[in-house]
Image: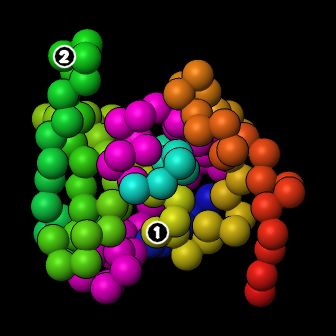
Amino acid sequence: MKVNGRCHCGGITYEAVVDPERAGLCHCTDCQTLTGSAYRATVLAPAETFTLHGSPKIYVKTADSGTKRAHAFCPECGSPVYSAALGDPQTYSLRVGCLEQRREIRPKRQQWCRSALPWSMDLRDVKKAD
């Protein structure tokens, strides 16, 4: 599936081809903090399909395992755009909220559920407004 995305202010834009079957949610505490939300929603894009326009700021996160990962965000509006391995990434983990096609990308898996905020797993009883 061909997708295009952008940060909130439009200073960073990109195009990619993704497999919607590779969309997921991560509930780890790092993702909660990095997104400022209950979880991170992503879909993977092979590096050869990813074209970036603009210059994101890169924050390098070192995991407990020692693995380093680049987290890209817009230096103007702060929108998180993607994460990828340092050096020669094979895939880019695109933030679903930045995609024009976000309504079509439904998560197929969840990970780090033991860190999930209990309320984030079932929102059916939360009041809704238009």
| 14 relative to 76 in the view: left or right | right
User: In percent of the image, x 77 and y 53: which residue is there?
Assistant: 123
Asked if the residue at tag 1 contacts the one at tag 2, i.e. Cβ–Cβ closer than 8 Å, the answer is: no
For mark 2, give the secondary structure.
loop
Circle 2 packing at 10 Å, graded few (<14), some (14-19), many (20+), is: few
The image shows residue 77, relative to residue 28, as above or below, that is below
Foreground of the two, 13 or 32: 32
Circle 1 packing at 10 Å, graded few (<14), some (14-19), many (20+), is: many
Point out residue 96 in the picture as x, y percentages from the top left corner. 53, 59
Q: Which residue is mark 2?
A: 66
| 75 relative to 52 in the view: left or right | left
Indicate which disc residue 118 carries: none
For mark 1, give the secondary structure.
helix
Amino acid residing under circle 2: Gly
The image shows residue 107, relative to residue 79, as above or below, that is above
The image shows residue 122, relative to residue 113, as above or below, that is below
Amino acid residing under circle 1: Cys
| 109 relative to 129 in the view: left or right | left
Q: Quadrant of residue 62?
A: top left
Point out residue 57 in the picture as x, y percentages from the top left corner. 13, 61
Q: Quadrant of the N terminus?
A: bottom right
- Nearest to N terminus: mark 2 or mark 1: 2
Instruction: Give yes or no for residue 26 being in the magenta stretch.
Output: yes
Q: Quadrant of residue 75?
A: bottom left
Instruction: Give yes or no for residue 31 being in the magenta stretch.
Output: yes
Q: Quadrant of the C terminus?
A: bottom right
Q: Which residue is mark 1?
A: 98
User: In percent of the image, x 33 and y 49: which residue is there?
Assistant: 34
Which residues are drawn in magenta? Answer: 6-35
User: In percent of the image, x 67 and y 58: which residue is there?
Assistant: 105
Foreground of the two, 114 or 60: 114
Foreground of the two, 70 or 115: 115
